[in-house]
């Protein structure tokens, strides 16, 4: 399940993020890569434990937890502190095909999560760089994702994925993982589809419509059945 989430950050927020990030020191992105990923990873990142990364990351989490589409799609239990990277054309930056680590640990907080979902929040406009597509493979095909600044994409962390070489400009993004209360991918997809249908019905019939209320009850009972908390 690949889900795009528009307007996680406003254009004003993105501009503030970029001003802070552009004035910060960056390090080799391989410092947080696993053994296999480090072989194919060429980019830069804000030091994960820096005040800048933590403050910006907290703003990302605040925006996401106020976003109904994100909550419906992810049903999040734990969100890993967001990281920030950039791919610069002059550095030949790219990230070859890889799969994310199954478990991630945070050195500052001691948080450890199972990485059910990966997320990329774009902080560069698509016209500001060439290349840099996020390519995600699933059972059926490969999907290229290159979204407007402030938009995000959510996808299974178990997917093989890559970032194509940036050949002009620079691609800046936030990336991170989360553990969902609904561990099973298919169950989580059905929960999202059901929630989306309920919201559409509520918009047409009202939230007090008897059938809407009944479906809402079914939704919450399925959450009770599947949730790991």
Image (cartoon, rainbow, N blue to C red):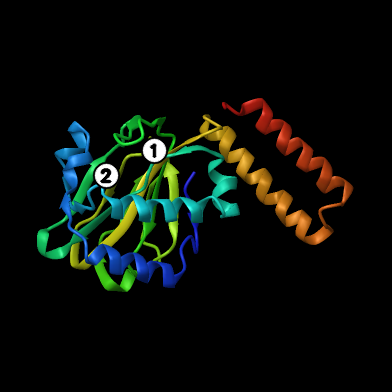
Relative vertical location of residue 137 with respect to residue 77 in this rendering, above or below: below
Is residue 29 depicted above or below 88 in this figure?
above
As drawn, which residue projects farthest toward the front? 51
Whether residue 166 sits left or right of residue 73 in the image: it is: left
- Contact (Cβ within 8 Å) of mark 1 with mark 2: no
Q: For mark 1, what is the residue?
A: 157
Q: Is residue 107 above or below residue 2?
A: above
- Residue depicted at x 73% and y 31%: 221
Horizontal and vertical percent position of residue 184: 53, 30
What residue is at 14 percent from the left and 39 percent from the top?
39
Residue 219: mark in rendering: none
- Return the residue nearer the eye: 224 or 58: 58
* Residue at screen point 76% across, 42% down: 216
Label 2 residue SS? loop
- Say which residue appears at 26% left-offset and 46% top-offset: 48
Quadrant housing residue 81: top left
Residue 57 seen in render: yes
CA gap, disc 1 and disc 2: 22 Å
Q: Quadrant of the C terminus?
A: top right
Q: Secondary structure at mark 1?
A: loop
Disc number placed over residue 49 in the picture, else none: 2
Is residue 144 visible to us here?
no
Callout 2: 10 Å neighbours few (<14), some, many (20+)?
few
Mark found first going from the N terminus, 1 or 2? 2
Figure disc tally: 2
Residue 131 x, y percent position in the rendering: 24, 63
């Amino acid at each position: 399940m690949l889900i795009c989430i528009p307007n996680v950050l406003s254009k004003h927020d993105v501009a503030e993020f970029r001003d802070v990030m552009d004035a910060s020191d960056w390090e080799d992105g391989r410092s947080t890569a696993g053994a296999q990923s480090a072989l194919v990873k060429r980019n830069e990142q804000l030091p994960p434990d820096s005040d800048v990364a933590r403050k910006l990351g907290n703003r990302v989490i605040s925006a996401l937890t106020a976003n109904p589409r994100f909550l419906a799609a992810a049903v999040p239990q734990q969100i890993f502190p967001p990281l920030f990277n950039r791919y610069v054309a002059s550095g030949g930056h790219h990230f070859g095909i890889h799969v994310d680590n199954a478990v991630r640990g945070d050195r500052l907080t001691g948080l450890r999560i199972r990485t059910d979902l990966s997320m990329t929040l774009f902080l560069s406009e698509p016209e500001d760089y060439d290349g840099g597509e996020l390519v995600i493979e699933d059972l059926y095909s490969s999907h290229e994702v290159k979204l407007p600044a402030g938009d995000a994409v959510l996808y299974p962390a178990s997917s093989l994925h890559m970032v194509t070489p940036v050949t002009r400009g620079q691609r800046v993004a936030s990336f991170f993982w989360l553990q969902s209360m609904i561990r099973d991918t298919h169950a989580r997809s059905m929960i999202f589809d059901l929630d989306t249908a309920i919201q559409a019905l509520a918009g047409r019939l009202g939230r007090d419509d008897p059938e809407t209320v009944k479906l809402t009850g079914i939704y919450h009972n399925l959450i009770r059945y599947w949730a790991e908390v």
